[in-house]
Amino acid sequence: MLACLTAPAALAQSPAELRVGEKVAAAPVKPPPSGVADLQWDDLMPKGWSARKALEGVDLASLSDNDPRASRLLDKLRQDLDRAPVVPALDGRRVRIAGFVVTLERSDKGVREFLLVPYFGACIHTPPPPANQIVHVLAAAPVPPEKAIFPVWVIGTLKTVAAVTAEGAAGYRIADAQVEEYPWRRRR
């Protein structure tokens, strides 16, 4: 659970040579399409909001794994993260944001529905990030599976629409999204 708050730099190695918790590196400058604003993940969180606030004043060292207080704290923390506030001013804006795909619906043609998350392995290898750090994406065209395992750009109209999925709760949605490869290089 706490891994979703800290986005660990390296918990596991993947076949794609990305590490769990790794965020997309800055891409070579490629301007977004006309009328589209580039967003960073921090832009999706209201000013002054922090997922860590729920842990203020809690002495984590005093809690053991089998302590009922720890279980209650984790339950409350998950509920708070699943209801993390969004930025209403972003509703209806045309945006481009880079992230990683967590597949929700796949066919032989590719991935049509997915969660876009800020770091590799979110929702699969670590607990989901806060809802304001997850975008529910409905792609206009299927994303080939071999592209969906690497970072992508998602371009479309951002809506402040919540979605609860088996992989996590999203605070935003982009429907009819364009999905493009994000420029990155494999480490050697």
Image (cartoon, helix red, strand yellow):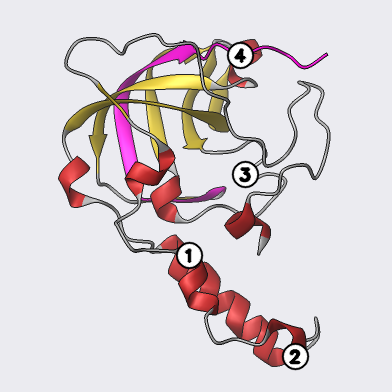
Whether residue 154 is situated above or below residue 56 in the rendered picture:
above
Question: Looking at numbered disc 1 in the image, what kind of residue is underneath it?
Answer: Ala
Camera-side residue: 183 or 132?
Answer: 183
Mark earlier in primary sequence (4, 2): 2
Tell me where residue 21 appears, x and y as whole percent.
67, 42
Mark pair 1, 2: CA separation? 21 Å
What residue is pinned by disc 1?
Answer: 51
Verify whether residue 175 appears in magenta.
yes
The magenta stretch is: 167-188
Tell me where residue 86 appears, x and y as whole percent.
29, 54
What residue is pinned by disc 2?
Answer: 62
Mark earlier in primary sequence (3, 2): 2
10 Å neighbourhood of mark 1: few (<14), some, or many (≥20)? some
What residue is pinned by disc 4?
Answer: 184
Question: Looking at numbered disc 2 in the image, what kind of residue is underneath it?
Answer: Ser
- Asked whether, in this view, residue 8 is left or right of residue 181, the answer is right
Mark pair 3, 2: CA separation? 28 Å
Whether residue 21 is situated above or below residue 154 in the rendered picture:
below
What residue is pinned by disc 3?
Answer: 122
Question: Looking at numbered disc 3 in the image, what kind of residue is underneath it?
Answer: Ala
